[in-house]
Image (spheres, rainbow, N blue to C red):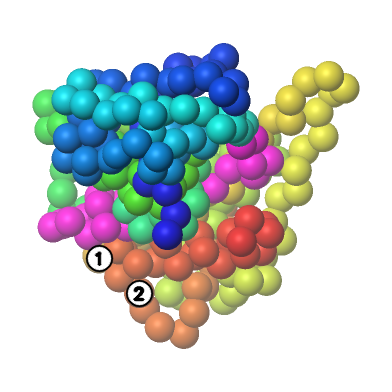
């Protein structure tokens, strides 16, 4: 069985090399020591959500947290092509189910979209609370999947904002794929963006590959037209109509395979 993962703050794991001891405190430390009752000698991983992972074992545990003996400090680089799920707001918990599964699949960012046919509306205080709830869902899924990188939950956009984002992504060399039942181009035949070369001595700048999923009522003709004009490509996922909660994760799994992540 794989080791449990606990989340630390980004950058907080720097400098903890093999042989050192890392104090896991706060809510995560109490969860490890009190709720899960991790004991001395048990294998645990601590990640910072930004690609750094401590592989270690518990030295001691108590009510305040656990002390982790570091066996290895691993830096997991960001992928050259970032997978971004543009998830339309949906009723019930279907949108949250989508981002939960997408996180487990390996999505790099989630962009909430207030589509024309979205029944749910994020406004004012509700927008902040709803985004915080999505962030909590992504955080839990990151730990479940034992990931070192936690997807970013971006600020929600409306149709105009999504069109602007799509145009910027395409202009930068990325791609925007809109899942649509009437599309004729299969997802598995779409040409994907290649990793962009960087100047010597500088890190490669990731391209974005956006996957746009509509709400229960589907994406309107006006939205399809505006996104297509911005450079997006409508694609067909398969012969069956999937729910908004499953379409994104399935598409991301196929893309992860094509990008050789899996």
Residue 67 appears in the picture as rendered? yes
State whether residue 179 is above or below residue 90: below
In the image, what residue occupies the spot 50% across and 60% down? 252
State whether residue 192 is above or below residue 131: below
Q: Which residue is mark 2?
A: 242
- Position of 112 with respect to 15 (left or right) is left
x, y percent for residue 65: 25, 25
Q: Secondary structure at mark 2?
A: loop
x, y percent for residue 44: 41, 40
Quadrant hosting residue 102:
bottom left
> Magenta span covers which residues?
76-98
x, y percent for residue 53: 52, 33
Q: Secondary structure at mark 1?
A: loop
Residue that sits furthest to the right in the current view: 200
Please tell me whether mark 2 or mark 1 is closer to you in this view. 2
Q: Which residue is mark 1?
A: 217
Residue 165 appears in the picture as rendered? no
State whether residue 171 is above or below residue 233: above
Quadrant hosting residue 91:
bottom left
Taking depth in this image into account, of 185 and 195 the one nearest to the observer is 195
Q: Earlier in the sequence, mark 2 or mark 1?
A: 1
x, y percent for residue 49: 45, 32
Taking depth in this image into account, of 15 and 156 the one nearest to the observer is 15
State whether residue 228 is above or below residue 169: below
- Position of 187 with respect to 100 (left or right) is right
Picture disc at residue 127: none
In the image, what residue occupies the spot 22% across and 55% down? 90
Quadrant of the rendering where the N terminus is positioned: bottom left
């Amino acid at each position: 069985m794989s080791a449990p993962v606990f989340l630390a703050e980004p950058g907080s794991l720097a400098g903890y090399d093999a042989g050192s001891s890392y104090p896991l405190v706060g809510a995560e430390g109490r969860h490890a020591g009190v709720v899960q009752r991790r004991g001395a000698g048990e294998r645990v991983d601590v990640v910072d959500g930004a690609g750094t992972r401590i592989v270690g074992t518990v030295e001691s545990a108590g009510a305040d947290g656990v002390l982790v003996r570091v066996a290895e400090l691993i830096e997991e680089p960001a992928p050259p092509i970032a997978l971004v799920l543009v998830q339309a707001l949906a009723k019930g918990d279907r949108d949250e189910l989508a981002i939960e599964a997408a996180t487990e699949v390996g999505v790099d960012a989630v962009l909430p979209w207030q589509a024309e046919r979205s029944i749910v509306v994020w406004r004012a205080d509700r927008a902040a609370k709803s985004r915080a709830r999505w962030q909590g869902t992504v955080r839990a899924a990151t730990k479940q999947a034992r990931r070192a990188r936690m997807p970013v939950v971006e600020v929600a956009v409306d149709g105009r904002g999504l069109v602007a984002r799509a145009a910027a992504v395409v202009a930068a060399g990325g791609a925007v794929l809109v899942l649509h039942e009437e599309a004729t181009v299969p997802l598995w035949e779409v040409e994907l963006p290649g990793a962009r070369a960087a100047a010597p001595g500088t890190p490669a700048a990731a391209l974005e590959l956006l996957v746009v999923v509509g709400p229960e009522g589907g994406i309107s003709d006006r939205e399809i037209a505006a996104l297509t004009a911005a450079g997006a490509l409508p694609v067909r996922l398969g012969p069956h109509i999937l729910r908004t909660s499953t379409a994104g994760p399935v598409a991301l799994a196929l893309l992860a395979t094509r990008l050789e992540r899996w």
